[in-house]
Image (cartoon, rainbow, N blue to C red):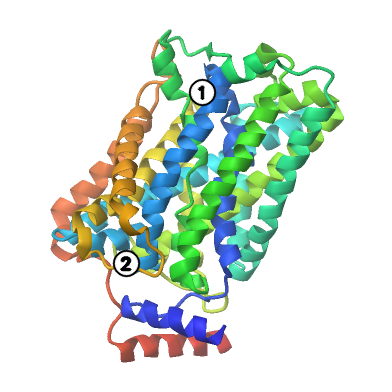
Amino acid sequence: MTRTVKSDAERLHELGYAQELARTMSAFSNFAVSFTIISILSGCLTLYGYGMNTGGPALIVWGWPLVGGMTLFVGLAMAEVCSSYPTAGGLYYWAAKLAPSHGPAWSWFTGWFNFLGQVAVTAGIDFGAASFLNALLELQFGLPATPVNTIALFGAILLLHAVLNTFGVRLVALLNDVSVWWHIVGVAVIVGALAVLPDHHQPASFVFGGFVDNTGWGSPLYVSLLGLLLAQYTFTGYDASAHMTEETHDAAVAGPRGILLSIVVSLVAGWVLLIGITFAIQDYDGALASKTGVPPAQIFIDALGITGGKLLLLIAIGAQLFCGMASVTANSRMIYAFSRDGALPASDLWHRINPRTRTPTNAVWLAAGGAFLLGLPYLWNATAYAAVTSIAVIGLYIAYVLPTFLRLRRGDAFERGPWHLGRWSHLIGVVAVAWVCFISVLFMLPTAYPVTLANFNYTPVAVLAVLGFAGGWWMLSARHWFTGPKVQGTPQEIAAIERELASLGGS
């Protein structure tokens, strides 16, 4: 262990940074963060109702392995770069190092897309948890599932996750380790109960071939493509393994493995979950019209009764709370690293490290506050949740693929880390870039017809707003001073930073 920690610190020094964060995470904990953020019990369930309207069972069931397979290409390409540059900055640091020219500009825009996606995915996860919690409270205490109540619960959950993340990485790592088993056992319990206990199950022809279009578009192809959002939104957040590498032992290998294992395990377990739930549907239209506002909750109740339905709902809520906590963790590390290089307004504030916990406490609160602001449009826009999930997908995946595109341009000049793809690197990278270009256009399109203010997909507005802000700031100011990731000094200066942190922690 001593030799591994020293090797990690030395590599971080070579990349220009001091070991400011506490390196206490194991390879399993690194995987657990990404697996928890993907969270099949969050993404699959919170967008299940969306999938019921946009393609129905056929798209819910078959869209999952299609999207999961394409996501694996993206993850493989990311993992190779992660092995070369195991830093908390992750994607935007990679872009700066891989760009043969204009590195600061590539780094700047990659970082801003990553920031947008991270905030949006945190908002999507905790908003989904708030919706499910509201459904449970409606069943138990009669609290109506109104937008105001959901937003209030959303804020409370974000507050809880911000508080948990202020206590340090050891607590977060422990909860993430627990979360892995909660998800695996939870899926087994939910699928097992839905397979054994209901008196009636849907026929296989319905589960694997039933098509439903409640969008108003009338085009099976277009609606089927829209239905891919359920799976693609779930497969987000696995860049967390990269952002946690400065806190992980043997980071150049553990980080890439964390990315890939989180995708593969989620792909298998998520497919089992979706098939199990779809077989158990008793009343399709009734589930969509449920007064809880959460179709899976109604499916659980119809299949198992009110008590059984509540128990399954509790399993899902627990998983979603774990997921949101891990998302705030990863988001705060990206904010910490990006502000370390002066790329966010008030960077000095967001980069501060709590000397007692060795965690970026201010960045934690920015992550939670930004997510809350992104979820507020739900108060007047019924389709706001779908828009938030689309923003998360587009923001994150553009940030995911820009370093891959730059790595393709580097060719043989790319310096591989200990984990790499060998001769398959180019082909995998090309497929990853093509897929991200496709979904980035797809999820900006309208999701309902006729298009009104109440169902308008505001994804393009949010993406263009961030792009406009980042682009305008770049042209007017940042291009004159932002030089990409800043190194923290000479080896002697880096050692001085680490001694100072050690003395503060000891005091």
Taking the spot 42% from the left edge, 34% from the top edge, the residue there is 390
- Which image quadrant is residue 336 in? bottom left
Q: Is residue 507 visible?
A: no
Taking the spot 52% from the left edge, 12% from the top edge, the residue there is 214
Residue 506 at x, y = what percent? 57, 89
- Which image quadrant is residue 461 in? top left
Where's the C terminus, which quadrant? bottom right
Residue 481 at x, y = what percent? 17, 65
**Callout 1 amino acid:** Ala
Residue 190 at x, y = what percent? 75, 36
Q: Is residue 315 above or below residue 384?
A: below
Taking the spot 78% from the left edge, 35% from the top edge, the residue there is 192
- In the picture of the structure, the residue carrying the numbered disc 1 is 382
- In the picture of the structure, the residue carrying the numbered disc 2 is 416
Mark toward the start of the polypeptide (1 vs 2): 1
Q: Is residue 10 left or right of residue 327?
A: left
Q: Is residue 421 visible?
A: yes
User: Between marks 1 and 2, how big is the CA–CA gap?
Assistant: 47 Å
**Callout 2 amino acid:** Arg
Q: Is residue 499 above or below residue 470?
A: below
Q: Residues within 10 Å of mark 2 (few under 14, many from 20)?
A: some
Taking the spot 49% from the left edge, 39% from the top edge, the residue there is 68
